Structures are given as C-alpha cells and as structure tokens.
C-alpha cells in the first residue's frame, strides 16, 4: 500500500502531478541538522525541467517546510516538505482517461484503483514525484558528506552511444565535481555531443530515447548492509526502482560479469596504505550484501520516455474499439539527464539508512 | 539487521552453513492450507546439490516442521521449518579465517561483525541458505497455483552461450513444464549441450563460469503492486538479491530497451478475447510498478562462483602479508542451474505478498 | 524514530504546535472512498478547543487535503491533510526553554534532541497533534460504519466523580448517539453536573483535574486481531498511548478483574439468535488477543493537565538553580472531554487496521 | 499476521503448546555477545512450572540454539532457540475442540483460523509461549546490565491482598535482588503469606485468582523513546499485552493519578548530585513518551487463570446446545508469580529496542 522506504530513516512520498502539492515526509533525521539550502536547491535544479533538452514545463519547485524544522534546524519531529503544483495543464491529459497511453501507468493504475486513480499527468505515478525524492536525497547526501561519503553519477549511454565508464577502483569525488560542472553530465565530452545530437533527433521526430546511468558512492566504510534480504544490492534496488522508467539495475561487473570466468571476475585482495582493498572492482564494492570499502558502483537502465508524439495504437476502454493516439503536451525526449540526481538521491537514502543501522552497534 | 522480507507474508531466513541447522519462519500463511509435500520436495530437489554438474556435497535437506502445522495443515501459528546441517567439513574452511577468499563475504562479514562472524562455509552468507528460501517459495508457488498463477525459468545464458528467450507475449505454463522435464533447463536443447560443455571446461580447469536466468510469472491479474517504492520491480528486486551471487536484474526489455526509440519500446494496447493486452511485451508485464496482466518477465545476472581451485591473491589479515590461496572443498563450477528454483521462489514470495496486499481491497 | 502507526493502514502524524502546520499522512485507504466531510468536521469539533470548559485558544482546524483525493474521492495516493497553525502565542512559552514545566515533555524532549527540540507550545509533543489523529480516525470511523461497526465513549470519571458505566454486554450505537447529543458526554446527567462543577473548581484555583474515559466498539465480527504481539489489546494500547496525558489502559474487567475468582471473571458462552455470545463481558470482547464478537470495551486513564497556574518547583537548566514557575497561557483545567474523540479515533484506526488484515484471508 | 515485535531488535515467537517445539527468533543482537547461560537459565526457571504453587507439568525448557551462535557468541545471523515440547497430554484437551473454554482463546482462534487452529493446550495462544519470550528477554536483560540498567518486579497484589509498593523515586537494583532471593516475590513478607494462603484457597476450590504485578526499570538514561506513537508507554504496552492473561497496564500514578489535582500529580524538578531529577515520580519515569531518567514504573493486571475445575457453562459448537464443562489437566490456580519474569522480559525487550534506536544518533 505504501509509498515509503527505509527502516532507520524513513521517507514517504506523496502527491499527484496535478493535485495541490507533492511532497515528502522524512522520519529519523538526526536533531540539530541545518541543511545547506542553496546546495539543496542546486541539487534539485539538476532534476528540474527547463533545460535546453528538457520539457518546457516550468516549475519553481520551491519546497515549503511545514514540519520538522525549528530555527532552521531539524528538531526531532518528522520533516515534511511540500512542493506546490503550478503550471499544470490538465486538459492535455483529458483524452487518456479511457485510452491508456502505451508505456504509461494509466491502464494499470486504473485497474488497481477501480478507475478512481488520478490520471491527470500520471497522478501519483508521475515523474514529478522524483522532486520530493531528490529533496529527501539532498538531506541524506549532506549528512553523508559529513561522514566523508560522496555520491555521483554520469550518463553511461544514450541509445547506443556510450560514455567512458568510471574507473571502478579509483573513482572519487573529483570525478563527480567535474561531471556536475560539465555542460553535459558525461566523462567524455565528445561522446556527450553525440548523445545530445541523438536526443535532438528524437525530439525532432516526436520520438524519445533511453539510456543507462552509472552511479558511484565513494568513501563508504566496509561493513554496511546486511546479509540475505537486507544486502546493499537489495536496499538500493528497492528504492531505485521507485524512479519511473527504471527497468534494470546491475552492480559491479553485473550482466557482463556473467560471461567471465570466475578467475577473471574475482577481485584479488591486497593491502594499500594499511587498508584492505581489491585490485579490481568487479564486485562493485559489495560482497555478501555488505560494503567492502571499495567504491560502490551500479548502473541503471532508463527506458525511452513513453510520452511521444508519434501515433500509437491503444484501445478505448469504454467502447472496446482500437484507437490511435498521439501524446501531446510538453515531454522530454529523453529523461536520462534529469534522472541522474534521482538515482543519486535514491542511493544516498539507501546508504544513509544502512549507515544509521550500523551506528547502533558501534561502540 | 534483518534477514526478513515481506509485509503480508513475512519470511525470515536463519542459520549458518555449518551450524546446527538452517531454516525459515513464514508468517501470514492462510490457515487450513495443506502443502503438497512431494511437490515441495521435487521443487527443492532442483536446487539440491548432487547433480552431475554440481557439487558432490550430499544433503537430504529434509525439512522438519516445528511450528505452524496441525494435522498437516497450516494452523495460524508462524510456520517454522528446520533443515539440519549434515556432511559439513568445516576443516575445509579453516584457512579462510584470516585469508579472505576473493569474491566471498569472508572479509566484509568479518568487518561487519567485528570478527565474530561464523566464517565456516560462508556461515549465514552461504548459498546453502537458499534451501529455506526455496522452501518458503514452494509454499507460495502452491498458493499461487490455486489462483491460476505459475512461475518458471530457464537458463538464458552460460558464459557467452545464449538460450532462446521466452516468447514474452505468449509464454505459459506448458513452457515451464517442458523445461522442468528437460535434461537441462533450457528452451533450446542444442544450446544446452554447449552450455554443459562450457561448465565441464570450467570444472576441468578448477575455474567457474556465470550466466543469466530468465524468469516469467504468468496468469497474474492486472493491478498487483504499488506505485513508487512498492512497485513489483522494487518488490522482486528486494528479494532476488538475497540469492548469493546475483549482481543484476532487468525487467522486460531492460538494458537492451534503453537503446530503442520510444516508439519501438512502447507496447501497443489491444483487445484480445475481451481483455486488454499488449501486442509486444517490452514492459515485462509491469507498468508504473503495477502488473498489466501480461507475463511478468525478468532476467538476473549470476556471477561466476567465486570458489575456484585456481590460485588467487589475497592477504593475511593478521600479518598484513600478501598470500596466495586456492579454494579446495567441493564447489560448483556453475551455480546457475541450481539457482533457477531460487529465483522462482523469490519471485513467488514477492508475487504472493503483493496478491495478499491486493485482497485487502477486493470486495 | 517514528510517529507512525499501522501495518495495513498507516498513519504518520507530523507538525509542531507553533510551526507552520500540523497534519497526517494516511496510506492504505481503499480507493473511491468519499469521506463525509460534514461528519468529519462534526467529529473534529468535539476535540476542538473553545467549549465553555475548555481553553480559549481558537483554531478553525480546517484541513487542507494536498494529496490522495481526486474529485473528492480517495485515489490510491497517500492521503495528506494539513491543518495550519494560527492564533499561536509563542511568547507564552518563552520562559520554559530553560525551566522545564513539571509533567510536560520540555525536559525529556530537550535531552532527547540535544536541545534542538521545538519547545514552543510543546512542539511535536503538543496535545494539538491529536487534531490530525482525529482526522485520521474520522476516515476510519466512516469506513468502519460501512461494515456495521460503531465506536463511542463517555467520561467514566472526573477526579473521584464516576459516571454509570456502559452495559458491557448490551452497549450499542444508540448509547453513543445519546452521549454525543448530551450537554456533557456522560451516561448519567446528574453525575455530569458534579463533574462540571469539579472542573470549574479546578479552573478557579488555577489547578487541573484528570479522569477516566470508557470506550466501546460494537458490531465487530469475531476473529479480528492476532495472537501474541499483535493482539487487539497490543494494537489498541500501542496507539492510544500516543494521546498526550494517557497513563493507563485496561480491557474488560481490567484491574478490578484481578480481585475476582476465575469462576467470577470467566464469561460463560451461550447461543443467542444463532450466534455464540457470552453472558457477561469481563473479557472486554477480546480473548487471546482476538475479538469475540462481544462489545470491545476498554478504559483509559487521563492524567490531570500538567499546565497549571499554581506555582510549581522546577530548575533552571542553565544556572542549576531551583526556580518557581506558573504556567500562564490558555489551558484546559481538564482535557478529558476533549480527549473522548481522540480515544475513539485511536480505537478506530487500530480496529480498521485489524479489519484490513483479516480481509486478506477472507474468501 | 505477525507474532513479531521490535524495530531495532526484532523477536518472533513461534510454536504451539503441544506441537514439536516452541521458540524464538531474535534479529539485531550485537555481534560477539556471550550470553551468561546459567543466569539465563535461572531467569527462565522463575517462569517454569513446578513450584509448590504452580502446575505439576514438568518441562526442562532447555533451549537448543540452532542459529546465531558461533563458539558461544552471537555471530550476526538471527539467533534461533528451540524449546522442545515434552510431557504434553493432548488427550486432556480433546473435549474443548467443540466446547470452548470460557476465558480462553479456543473460540476466537477457531473463528479466526476457520477451525484449523491447533486447540491442543491453547496452541500458539498458550502461556507456554512465554518461555521463549523470557529467553529473548534474558538476552536483553544481560545486554542492558552492561549499560547499567536493571529491571525487576514484585507481586503488587493477589486478589485483594496488596504488597507494599516500590518506592518510585528510590527503587534500585538491591530491591530486585532482595525480591529474587525471597521465598515469595514480594516486598512485604507478611503480605506474601496472605497471598499464598489465598492461592491455596483457590486451588482447593478448583478455582483461580488474579493479581497485579509492579515492574520497574532503573538506571535508564533520560531521552529514550519517541513522541506520539513510539513513546515508551506505547512500546512497553505493545509487548506486555503479548503475555496471555494481561488485561491492563498503567504507568506511574496511572488510574489513581486521575483522581488527583494537577498540582498533586505533577512532579517537581530538582537538581540532585548534578543531575535533573523529580522529587516525586507520578510520571513513572516517562514524560511525553520519553524517559526522564527517573525509575520507569508500571503495573499490569493479570486476570485469574481461566482454566478452573469448577463447572462452567459453554456451548457445543456442533450441536448448538448448551453444555457444562470442567477444565481438568494441570493448571495453576494463579499465574501471577510465574508471570513476573515474563513482564520483566517484555520490558527489557522494549527498553533495549529503544536504547538501540537512540544509539543511532549518539556521537
């Protein structure tokens, strides 16, 4: 039933795309924490619509904090932030009530909620709900930063155009800063230009394109996460799939690692500067569900935006007749660039939750 | 902290590979259910060691039910099943206490638990813990069968040798039966022979090889799962990663779908026999986290078994010196065939949990 | 960490008494439910300040629904209601920052949250948080009403003045209606007059007085609740103690029953109109944690309001010196009358949660 | 559905009175903890049947640890302890299948589980399930002892015979030791003799008698517990009601405090030895759900054992006819003495869970 996540820190996402507001409840924040608001807003701006390659819908996404702060600091009460919905054109969606858009949740939400779901703009299923996810993630990222942990990501591919991957052994905070400061969030600027051309091509055709995001968390101590059902892979996957359009996740060498011999995929242990490390990092920083102290690296698959202007086949749920539809409105031809901070936010929440868990047992 | 999963049905896995017993607690089973014990044992036998291609370790894996049954039927109390550990040769592992095996949880568990972890045979991190997972899965599979839902899987690839994939639109229970009755669990027998040759090659070299498993659930009603953090992808991923060695999961067109145009990846809706269906199934039966009524299809990446006889580099945690080690004992050169029922079990638990959730709101 | 309750329906209370807003998130409401808003407001009005015997603080307590409704009906998204704080005079509380009020959470919250807690008006610990509790309860009460279940309460005592108790065997909805329509919520009007006189006496002395509330739920099917840790007593107690000032709860014959012989306290079974019932109801409608179908009856102890004008001894946390303080502001000399709907709301949430649980297993 | 409790430490009770075994799973124990087994057994012996005043059923209650220990210390895996059932005479219960015993869960469990419940000896509802509760409590008590926290209890009354209460301000570990070493667990030996006479009287009549238990936890730091739904009262009540026969709980001055003026019930703050304390302790060590550092004191109501030899009225569920029954077998005329360690165990689990919660936020 729930749009909640976490055991030690708990986030609950709420709101519908064209309802009065969207927002998030965060329970379990440490008291006395003063979030760096400009940094929070910079982080959320990376997700916001309005970039050259993104949808034209404009939303200031200015959060209002109605609970949990006192004199600018967390005070123990659940933190609740609202983001009011503005500039919503519900009329754009009037047609989809009975003619579900392919690739969207219109049909499945209608079945689940006996046709009482708010279909306007995707309702509670909208990508817009990632704004409060990012807000919660920004809190966690700043709390992690105080522990020396940083999380960053880049576009690993758009369509079939790949970027250079992170160096899984040596990736560090400088890499993340470089990507954030880049025109386009990639390691290899030349590949970035090709990606942008591909996105433009999709837009000009009324089509869309997907991609892959690679995310890394560095500075993690060894020992976070739990065996079996609460491993770091379980925890991260359980929240990353909250981001609409994510259809796959792999850690370390992932699917490609399946084609290797064990002798190739195993990472030899070594000592380095007095610490146990591994020479390669096919395990993606996680062994047995628990962090090894090496960079935690994973990739997620982002499907092509389902909202496209090209004509598509659907059905009229009332008449039982086939229909053709074309999704108008203002849509991104590629949501991958805007999804980067969402993936980082999801990872930050999962990691911070595991970190709090571990603190219970530290002396 | 927890080795538990589920909100409506809840499983808790316990035990260490070389401790007195492993087992599972299942809370939330409906009362009056008489499990088909021979079917349960056939299911667990698919996971059991001892096949021609598998480890030589022999375990009857006969469960003892100490709670939850009365006159052979579930009675409302938590169901608890024990599987006693036998034929364990802890001496095989004596060396790894201070020299962690590459690719294993020896090191991370040691750090997490301040060196108090039971390292023998991997302890609580052992693949042996998938026996009680399968046991819990067998209960859910039988309960799902009563609702017309079936779950099956095949080896999608070993190393670089692929099998023919499921037909994502038309896959059905007959496909599953055929695979279960086959000599080797694949759709294409010829490819199966190549896979077996590859596994034999790995064994003869003291090496190992990984692979990919494709799993499908059919007969699902539309409307299962929840938005955001409790979508079917989240739920399935959150338990599938409990299986040791799984490093990736993708639903529907997954990572390959990222390279398609939106117009290619979207699945057109149509009516068929009075029901809404999709012509293709790139969405893998899940839209917005909720089942569409089409087959739910996902693939998981299984890494090459880390236990290999080839010499590997590690470190001596006591002396700080580099060491070489070779993992003796009896190990599978490829755990993919034995992982099939584990993946089906994980999927069954996730699906049954979602099904119970939905029943709360049915009239 | 959490201000949340429930497994099938989940409520999360947020806000601080003098912050921007208080409110509640309700997850798990069935879709398509149109709350009767006037009935909801009548229910909340019973809790609202402003009665002749209550505090002079005026708050319209008009909820704003920012999530979860579409065209006036629940739509599957979490329901979020805000109640803006108005008419708050924080200056009234300025003194208590370093001189904790006896009987209040000023001191304990300060310790817990390292002095970052919002002490104004009790912050998140304020009785004002019972407004969103009542709001959530109103939803559950209306949902229960559709199942033939009603919940009501009366003042069982103020100070040492008792009311006539409910007839635990025959109490029904008509009793509840009579109490709601009465000038003062008691069964025996004459006793009510004495109670009011006692409250007036407390007010005139700058003092306060406590009391006991008796609550009953009728129309419950047998079979709700679970053994051991999830019995109806556990579930109800776990939420009733959320109401500030509640210091005790007893079910059925409760503490008085301890002085009876088993032969007196046991309730004989009988058949009545084809149903199994009990002749007496010392068990308060719960046996083994599970409802018996008899009225569920419990009583809660409400301590005297700690905010009193009489001078009291406290300490100055900064100087370490003893101080005397007198709590000014506008406070109820007795919160018992306003606590009635809070107790009903808590019971309704617990019962509705148990009812949803049971629906999972109904055919 | 669940027989589980706790968020940071999690216990799950399982088993049926006359099934193969009862037991408990404990998740979240710190690694490396070596339980003092003789102390654990002494604690459990206080609950065990066989005392002069107790049932004649003999059970060694020797726990078998099948998971969670390695070389005698906790190793990170869930701890699982089994207690085999022996000396069970199921035939004693054959009659109650269709003629539910008054005051027992026979009827409600039958309804809940569609008559598939294990009615033998109360099944999962049996008081016998408090043996694994005590086992879990013993672990928590020993862990709390390392933090300077002690928990003890005495019989506050049997029938109408009261004991001298704890001094709520000064109660300490020495009081607990004295009670444990006493012939009968009371503060006032003379009152204890009267209680024993009353119990003997009940036995000789084939009847039973109830009582009240007072429990205190001392050495607690201020700041444990959470506001609203997770206060210490909520947490303790939520597990204490798991003990069969408990029908009420009150903290501090509880129900009696309702008859006091606010000026009497409020506890003045003072400094003592540099620490903030209160001169009286009507608040029972909890303000706003959070510990104040004063002794945490509560009382629970234990109903008279429902199993009595006196003839009682019931119904034949098959024929619909009234019947008379007399509960044979071996039953305690008063379970209060044996319930003391159960209440301490429940309190210990709740307090330890809150303590772990707080550790997440300590620097």
Image (cartoon, coloured by chain):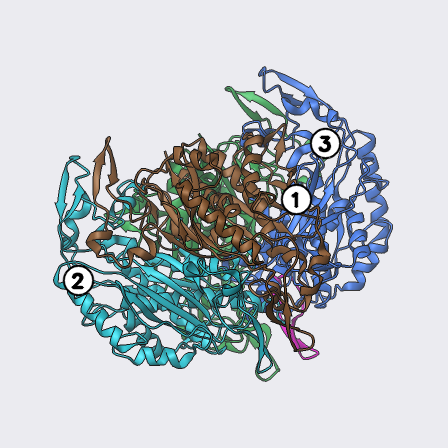
Chain colours: A blue, B green, C brown, D cyan
Where is residue C281 drawn, in percent x and y? 29, 45
Residue at label 2?
A: D202
Q: Residue D325: percent from the left, percent from the top?
A: 13, 48
Q: How many marks?
A: 3
- Residues rendered magenta in the picture: A264-283
- Residue drawn 23% across the image and 54% down it: D306
Q: Quadrant of the C terminus of chain B?
A: top left
> Is residue A191 depicted above or below C317 in this figure?
above
Q: Is residue B238 above or below residue A353?
A: above
Q: Which residue is labeled 1 in the image? A: C58
**Chain for numbered disc 3:** A
Quadrant of the rendered structure where residue A334 is?
top right
The answer to whether D47 appears left or right of D273 in the picture is left
Mark 3 vs mark 1, foreground winner is 1
* A268 is within the stretch colored magenta: yes
Q: For the point 43% across and 66% down, which residue is it?
A: D349
Q: Is residue D182 above or below residue D362?
A: below
For the residue pair D127 and C163, the one nearer the viewer reads as: C163
């Amino acid at each position: 039933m729930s749009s909640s996540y976490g055991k030690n820190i708990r986030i609950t996402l709420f709101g519908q795309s064209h309802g009065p507001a969207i927002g998030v409840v965060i329970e379990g924040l440490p008291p006395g924490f003063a979030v760096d608001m400009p940094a929070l807003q910079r982080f959320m701006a990376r997700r916001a619509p309005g970039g050259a390659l993104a949808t034209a819908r404009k939303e200031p996404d200015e959060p209002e904090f109605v609970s949990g702060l006192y004199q600018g600091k967390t005070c123990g009460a659940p933190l609740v932030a609202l983001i009011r919905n503005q500039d919503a054109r519900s009329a754009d969606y009037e047609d989809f009530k009975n003619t579900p858009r392919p690739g969207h949740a219109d049909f499945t939400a209608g079945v689940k909620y006996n046709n009482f779901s708010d279909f306007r703009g995707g309702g509670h299923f909208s990508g817009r709900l990632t704004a409060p996810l990012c807000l919660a993630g920004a809190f966690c990222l700043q709390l992690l930063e105080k522990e020396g942990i940083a999380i960053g990501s880049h576009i690993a591919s758009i369509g079939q155009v790949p970027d250079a991957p992170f160096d899984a052994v040596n990736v560090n905070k400088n890499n993340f800063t470089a990507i954030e400061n880049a025109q386009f969030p990639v390691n290899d600027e030349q590949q970035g230009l090709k990606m942008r051309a591909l996105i433009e091509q999709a837009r000009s055709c009324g089509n869309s394109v997907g991609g892959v995001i690679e995310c890394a968390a560095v500075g993690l101590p060894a020992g976070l996460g739990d065996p079996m059902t609460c491993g770091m892979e379980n925890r991260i996957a359980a929240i990353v799939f909250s981001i609409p359009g994510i259809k796959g996740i792999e850690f370390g060498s992932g699917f490609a690692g399946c084609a290797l011999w064990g002798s190739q995929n195993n990472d030899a242990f070594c000592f380095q500067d007095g610490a146990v490390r591994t020479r390669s990092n096919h395990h993606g920083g996680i062994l047995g569900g628990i962090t090894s102290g090496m960079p935690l690296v994973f990739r997620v698959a982002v499907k092509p935006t389902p909202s496209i202007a090209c004509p598509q086949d659907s059905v009229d749920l009332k008449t039982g007749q086939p229909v053709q539809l074309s999704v108008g409105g203002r849509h991104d031809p590629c949501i991958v660039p805007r999804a980067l901070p969402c993936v980082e936010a999801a990872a930050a929440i999962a990691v911070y939750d595991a970190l709090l868990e571990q603190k219970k047992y530290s002396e």
